[in-house]
Structure formats: structure tokens, C-alpha cells
Image: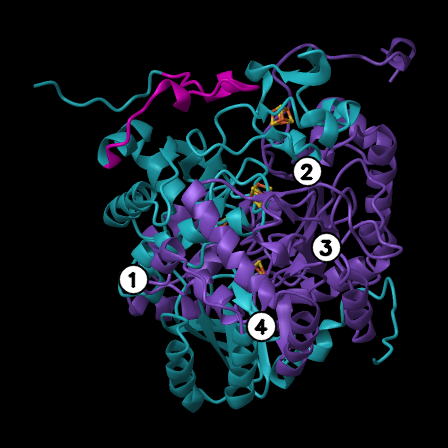
Chain colours: A purple, B cyan
Amino acid sequence: MTKERKTPLLDELEQGPWPSFVTEIKKEADRPMAHDLLGILERSYADRVSHWKHGGLVGVMGYGGGVIGRYSDLPEEFPAVKEFHTFRVNQPSAWFYTSDALRTLCDIWEKHGSGLTNMHGSTGDIIFLGSSSAALEPCFAELSHHGWDLGGSGSNMRTPSCCVGPARCEWACYDTLAACYDITQAFQDELHRPFFPYKYKFKFAGCPNDCVASIARSDCSIIGTWRDDIQVDQAKVGEYARSGTDIQSEVCNLCPTRCMSWDGRELAIDNSNCVRCMHCINVLAKALKPGKQRGATILVGSKAPIIGGALLSSVLVPFLEMKPPYDDLKELTAAIWELWGEHGKNRERVGEFIQRVGLGNFLDGIGLDPVPEMVMHPRTNPYIFFEDELDDDAGNA
Amino acid sequence: MTEFQRQTDIGPPHYERFLPPIVKKNYGAWDHHELLRPGVMVHVAASGDRLYTVRVGTPRLLAVTTIRQFADLADAYCDGYLRWTSRNNVEFLLTDPAKIDPLIRDVQALGYPVGGTGNQISSIVHTQGWVHCHSSASDASGVVKSVMDRLFPYFTGSKSLPSKLRVAYACCLNMCGAVHCSDIAILGVHTKAPVISHSDLPKMCEIPTLIASCPTGAIRPATVNGKPSVEIEAGQCMYCGNCYTVCPACRINNPESDGLSIWVGGKVSNARTTPQFSKLVVPFMPNNPPRWPEVVDAVERIVTIYAGNARKHERMGEWINRIGWPRFFKLTGFEFTKYHIDDFRHAGETYNRTAQLRHERGS
Ligand code: SF4
Ligand code: SF4
Ligand code: SF4
Ligand code: SF4
């Protein structure tokens, strides 16, 4: 057992009702890595700077990603965390586990690393925090022996993730778990061997509530939706009204297109003007349901601010049936990767690439026709760059 | 030593292995769900089956000891099945409602709270901070812990909110957590260009790689004291930390000029209004560990004023759009400065191009 460390600043963070990460680290502090992590973290709290640095690629044989190299700038003082690399372990769809599976992961990680994890990382992976360089190969061998594989890092497809979808949500418009699993398996090479200009993320949300923030956090956002009419059980709408829901003000008035009306007996919906926002369904969960012709809207390009500013994904395919083997999505993805892979600059996300070349040219490149759903409105400036063939065709159409 | 069979490109285990029988049986056939009380939901299938979920908050950083404790609880109450949410909560999945209370008692005894459903504040999604990242302008876990301690009643449901409220934290502009569409985003910011150690640089770094690492072209070759080095054009730096990633002699972390900013009004859901970015409220607050009181106070102030003023179903950004930014700043008391006015690309689109303004009667 290692000597207890003095961590007065971190100890402050064991007070208060919210569970403490310091307590978590202390739970493993009888082993050297977590013990030294407490030490270096206390130092950061005193110095008000990070004591980690990057430097040097690390990984497992045959893979170009999945491990993030991390070194401390105080190797003499805290030798056990001199090397403190991160393993990204590809999570199962929608983060379902059995207790046995978790114990296997714990056994492996306790044996090879710090015993500390993030459940989960921002992209969705199980994060094993803190491995030495020497432990990487044996840890990976044991993980893969038990059926676990690494997720993505670097300029590759990043680990796809999905919402709980049909496993527990009545609003799922396609099978998010199956789609996420299928795409992950179909693109293992792209996940493990970086050869893109930059990262490429998929997130699968079963409906426009977008519980996985796909529209803000993925290069390809797959958001469930429907084409036909909202399913309405008028009797149950009445029950909501009788038990205190103000249908007019809470539902109709908040509908973005004002396509609903309520006369006290019947809820009428002009489905041709419904934009599938989910508000009425969220509020009247027992009475309303998405339609039966279900699929997804495919949007592309969201990212965090660096370099050219933050982006939300924008519409590429208004409606796609999401049926296995997801050939349409895979073909679309291959076309995007080919174009962006060839013309994208180093560290240019696909959203920035589209901004640079223009959505119109991007569509030409991937072979999609423009449709008005892709824009909020047509252009307002007259600087149209007419292409040459128009000279010949003009007036002959 | 046991020989393990090393395999590559097997991908994640198939999720079906981990689905509880009730989920397999009713997959895609759920009818509706209800919140029974804060942190406890029931999902009712078309078959009539009822699946109970108990949602538990965690610090995201979990010891294997804790994960084993959760596994034991899952065995005791849930036939061994559990899941995590996209916001780092654990969800215990039960079929027997009689087991809900004993489970909650046990999980709370371990120190983990139950809540975060419906119109409550769910766990704060966050990044690595000083625990594990080299470019962090502040710690992540410590700020999150401090804020959640204060917002705790909104997690457990003892205080209520008009709508969902999503708080997110990232410790630098890289925003691993892409926090930029949250009701409240706390963002670590570097405010000064990296400081170069010219004595270390030639030993530690390759100059061409270093120059190429800067996305804005702010790094140029220079000769310092007769030795090859680089200089950084501070006006071009956007504090991304890429140079520090490839060259530890370009130190971006700075205890005085690193700090935190606060942004509000973003959302990702399409319900009612379209997804929105968060907008700047507080450009800079100092790093004040271990409890960051200025940041915690500011976040609590925003939450309290939102809770007291927004209408039912109105998210933070929807409320602000209704009352207007001038009133938001007035109600919250934060100062509006030149930093709040966008000067990046397309900044003009954020200028107010209308005479539609709310005025207050003069005295
Ligand atoms: S995104 Fe929609 S389908 Fe998926 S969990 Fe959220 S509400 Fe359910
Ligand atoms: S889903 Fe949204 S747009 Fe459609 S009817 Fe309901 S509230 Fe209106
Ligand atoms: S947000 Fe920045 S500092 Fe924080 S973990 Fe991500 S890259 Fe590191
Ligand atoms: S922090 Fe980023 S923008 Fe600033 S000099 Fe370094 S690489 Fe360039």
C-alpha cells in the first residue's frame, strides 16, 4: 500500500452532494498510477495549469488510432504517470451492458492500467484512462480476446454512436442500434487506419429530439423522421385535456408551423405543413405517435469551432429509408469520402470542405441533385458563377 | 501466463448480447413512457410489459471499483442488465417495481444520486481537463463537480424547471464535447498566444512540423540568439493549442490568462424551434480552483432567473428570444461588452437589422 498523499485542494472536491471524481481516483489510489495521478492533479490545482503534454505517437500493432498518447511534464516527481495513455474501447450500441461484461472490462483494465475510466468519452467510447506504453499491446490482446475492439482517433472514421432507439424509446423512427452496429462493422478499416483529411463522425438519433446531439456533433447526422401523418388517438388527446393539459397553449400555439388546431373535442393536424419537430408528440406522448412510413433525414457537416467556426449539420437527403444493409447510406458515405478524401485539405472537416467548395459543387462531386430542402432559402446575392456549358444551352431548354 | 488470442477489426460486441429479455421481446414495440418521479421512468410496451428505469448521476470518471459496484447492483435488482446514457448517467433497468426503492436506497448509499429525467438538469457532459488533457485552459471535472453541487436540487427534482436544461463543459476551443449547442455551456479559454521556450525548442521540436501545425499560419521561422526557432504572430492566434500538441516548448497553458467563459441558449433538439448555437454571456472568468465560485454563482444566477421567468416548455434560448437579449442582460446583470459583438466571419449577420426593439418607458 502506497503512502497516503496530501491533497488539500482536491479534498475540497469531495465535499458536497454530487459524486466526486476525486473520490473515484482515491478508490484506486492503493496502486501507483492513481496515487501519482492524485499528486499531479493536486499540483495542477495549485499551479492552475495542466501538467500533461502530448508528444510521440503510440498505438497497437496494425492500428493507426484508438490510443491517445499522453505524457506528464513532471516525470521525476510522479513516475507512475510518466506515460498515461488513453485507450478508446468501442462501446456497444446504445451503451447497454451486462454485469459480466463490465466485470471483464474491469478485470482487464485493473490488470493493465490505472483502473480509472470515463464512462464514456465524448464520442461514445469506453475510455480507459492511463496506460503505460508497455501495457498497450498486452491490454489490447486481452481486450480483443474477449471480443472488444478499439474505437477511432486521429483522422479516421470515429466511433459511431446512437441513441437508445427502439430498445426503449417509442419514438424511434428506425433501428438506431442496428444501423450504428452495421456501419461500425462495415467500416472497420476506416475506423482503425487513419487516411482521411480529418475525423469523420456518425451519430444515429432515432427521432428529431436528437438525444445524441447528432446535429451538433457529427459529420454525418442520421435523424429519424416520418413521411406520412402523425398517428392521433383522439380519445387520449381528450384525456390529456381533461387532466389539465392546455392543448391550445401548450401544443397548438407552440407548433412551429401552427399546423394544428383544437376545438375542444378534436385535434386537427395539417400534416402537409408539419415539419416533424416532435413537440406535440413529446407533450401528448400517449395520444400522438410519429407516422408509420419511417426513415431518416441525413444531414452533414457539424463540428466544433476550430478552425473555421462551429457548424451545425445541414440537410443532404431529406428522407432515406433506413433498412439493412443500409446500402444507400453506405454509397453516399463512400462518395463523400472519395471526394473529400481527394480534395479536402489536411485537418479540414467535411463541413468546412463544403463551405469552401460550396454545397452546389459538393453535390456535383458526389452525384446528388440539389433540392430546396437543402437550404433555408435560395441565394440572395446575384453573384452566380455560371458554368460554361450554359453558354451553349441557354435559351434552348 | 495465459496466451490471449489477439484479433483485429472485430468491432464492438453485438448489442443484442446486452439487451434485457424484456427489451428483446418489445424491441421497437414501445407504446409510451411516463415519469413516475424524478429519476424513475416506466416504459410501457404495446404488449403491456412495463420496463422501469432508474437514472443515476455519475462523475463520468469512474473507478473500476465503482463499476463493479454498479454491476453488483444490476445483479441484485436487474438480472444483471444496465446501460449508460449519452450524458454519462447510469440507468438500471428493472421489471419488478417492488425493487425500485431498495435499488435507490443502495445506489444512494454508495453516493450516487437519482434524478436527471424530464425537466430536470441532467449530468453535465464534459471533457478531460487537468485530469488528462494537455491543452486544457481549466479543469473539467472540478468545475463540473462544483456546479453540480450547487445545481443539485435541479437534478434530484426538488426544484423544478420550465423545460429541459442541458449544461455542458469543455476545457478549450477544441470542444471535445462540442458544447456549442447547450442551454448553458461553460468553456475554458486561453486568451494569450503560446509562450515559446527558445532554449528548449531546438531540442524538442521539428520546426517545419511546428509551423505546419498552426491552422492560421501564425507561426513563422525566426532566429533567436543565433539559434533556429519560431515566432508567433499573436494577432493571428486563435488559441487552438495545435502547436503545443506537436511541440511542448510552445506552452499555451498560463495560470493568469487562462479562464472560463459562459454561453447560453443553444439546443440540439428540433422540438418547436430549430437547433441553435449557444451565445456568449460572460467572456472571461478567472481560474479559481478548487471551487470556481465566480463560475458557479454565474451559472446558478442564469438558471434561477430562467426558472423564474420562462414559460412552460420554453428552453433557455426560446425564452431569451421571446424577451430579447437586452432584457436577458438586464435581468441577469451581466455586462454587455465589445467582446459580445461577433467579429469573425459573417459577423454582420448577427447585427440587429431592424427597428423592432423593446423600449422602456422613460422616467
Ligand atoms: S432521439 Fe428520439 S428516438 Fe432516440 S432516444 Fe431520443 S427521443 Fe427516443
Ligand atoms: S410535430 Fe411539430 S410541426 Fe408537426 S404538428 Fe407536431 S408540433 Fe407541429
Ligand atoms: S476540450 Fe480541449 S483541453 Fe479539453 S479535453 Fe478536449 S482538447 Fe483537451
Ligand atoms: S495556438 Fe493554434 S493558432 Fe495559436 S499559434 Fe498555436 S497552433 Fe497557431
Judge the density around disc 1: few (<14), some (14-19), many (≥20) Cα neighbours within 10 Å: some
Q: Vertically, is B186 above or below A139?
A: above
Report the disc number at residue B64. 4
Between B343 and A380, the residue placed more toward the observer is: B343
A330 sits to left or right of B155: right
Amino acid type of the residue tagged 3 in the rendering: Thr
Asked if the residue at label 4 sits under 8 Å from ligand 3, the reply is: no
A97 sits to left or right of B159: right
Find out whether residue B342 is within the magenta segment.
yes
Between B192 and B310, the residue placed more toward the observer is: B192
Separation (CA) of disc 4 from disc 2? 36 Å
The residue that mark 3 highlights is A159
Q: Label the magenta part by its dominant secondary structure.
A: loop
**Marks 4 and 2 on same chain:** no
Tell me which residue sits at (92%, 10%) in the image: A392
Tell me which residue sits at (66%, 21%) in the image: B216
Q: Vertically, is A22 above or below A48?
A: below
- Subunit under mark 2: A
The residue that mark 1 highlights is B153
Instruction: Give the mark toward the camera: 4 or 2.
Output: 4
- Secondary structure of the residue carrying tag 1 is helix
